[in-house]
Amino acid sequence: MNQLKETFSTCLFERTPVKIIFSSPRKKSLPYRRVTIRPLLHCGRPSWQAEYTYEKKAIHENIENEQILEFCIDFVLRDFKQINLFTEEEDVQILAAKPDRPRITRKPGTLKQENLEHNQAKQYIIPDGTPCDFLIRLGVMNEQGKVFPKHYAKFRQINRFLEILQDVFPHLPDTREKPLRIIDFGCGKAYLTFALYHYLNVMKSMNAEVIGLDLKEDVIAFCGQTAYDLGYTNLQFLMGDIADYTSDHADMVVTLHACDTATDYALINAVKWNTSVILSVPCCQHELFSQIKNDLHQPMFKHGIIKDRFTELLTDGLRGLKLEACGYDVAMIEFTSLEHTSKNIMIKAVKTKAANSKAAEEYEKLKAFYQVKPAIDCL
């Protein structure tokens, strides 16, 4: 217990705190799945705000500075087993399945403290009100940089994608020896492909080659012309099927709303190339709907909508396990709000270690239990 208090006290009061994330609930009955705490100034006084993340909503609570240490310790003892403390000086992870014997790891800080003023405007990576060439060209904002109201959901989605990209940024290879190669499978109208290129090459001054692949000839022609007009010389668009695409490597693979097994073919290619980072938002997971067989769940599967949603989650769960088995650190995160699309689960995978035999065993058990053979099985 003393070790926990000392760690929290140091991060809260002796470092420059950025945020604290409590996750991995101790009980399945806990109504909120995660709590994020950030410092703020409330009426000019140091304070804290806790955000409770429920399945379909978030609730905020302000906490006095004098209460924050006790507040955090109570969360560990009562509700959560994993804590990530981010300060400007260091990132600290606490695994507290047994609070009296926590496992604590540290690494250099990766985040900076933002403006602490309460009720501040949302700070986007690409801000509203500042002209951005590709967003102007794609009709998201006007020449003065003001986002059009009808495109604000797309603007938020782009910035959410860049926030996720910012998180995985440290895992991308150094570009001093050779440029990054990034492939966006099923790029569509390529809002996020352009955002990816702009963030890495323009905002971060990196050397990144970005390739967008899609089946629609008119879309590829438009995107190619737009990239040329913007002077995005290392951004190219190709027409083709994900399943047939060949390359020697990619440092990062992106697949956003690639339909059904197209997601699997993208993941298979990424693993074969030993890709460092994979960001995938699956869509239309129909493959297992006609395969799944399980006597225990059959009364539930007689309802088509239940069976469809269940097989979607099973498909993504199997994909995640297969990636873990191949040596990836996998997280399933919310990409966009459910109010905009139901296809909002992103598979974020970072190559960090050797093959995981336990994940491979869990994958095989799930397959056998539901009598399915997904496309990702060929990995």
Image (tube, rainbow, N blue to C red):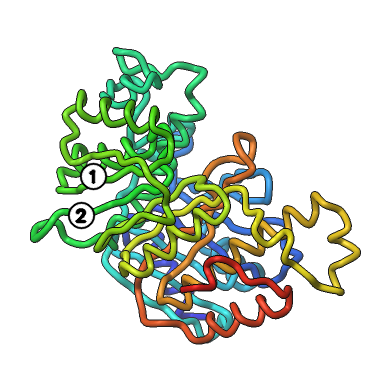
Q: Is residue 96 visible?
A: yes
Identify the residue at horizontal 48%, vertical 25% (top origin).
152
Q: Position of residue 81 (x, y in %)?
A: 57, 73
Tell me what residue is drawn at x 38 percent, y 38 percent. 192
* Residue found 50% across the figure and 67% down from its top: 83
Residue 181 position by quadrant: bottom left
Is 78 on the left or on the right of 281, as rendered? right
For the image, the number of numbered tags is: 2
Contact between marks 1 and 2 (CB within 8 A): the answer is: yes
Q: CA distance from mark 1 to mark 2?
A: 10 Å
Q: Which residue is mark 1?
A: 200
| Neighbours of disc 1 within 10 Å: few (<14), some (14-19), many (20+) | many
Q: Which image quadrant is residue 6 in?
A: bottom left
Camera-side residue of 217 and 142:
217
Seen at 38% across and 68% down, the residue is 271
Of marks 1 and 2, which one's residue comes earlier in the chain? Answer: 2
Tell me the tag on residue 180. 2
Mark 1 or mark 2, which is nearer to you?
2
Q: Position of residue 1 (x, y in %)?
A: 52, 80
Give the label on residue 55, or none: none
Front-lying residue, 204 or 218:
218
Judged from the image, the secondary structure of the residue bearing numbered disc 1 is helix
Mark 2 is on which residue type? Leu
Q: Is residue 6 left or right of residue 196?
A: right
> Visible in this render: residue 88?
no
Q: Position of residue 267 (x, y in %)?
A: 44, 62
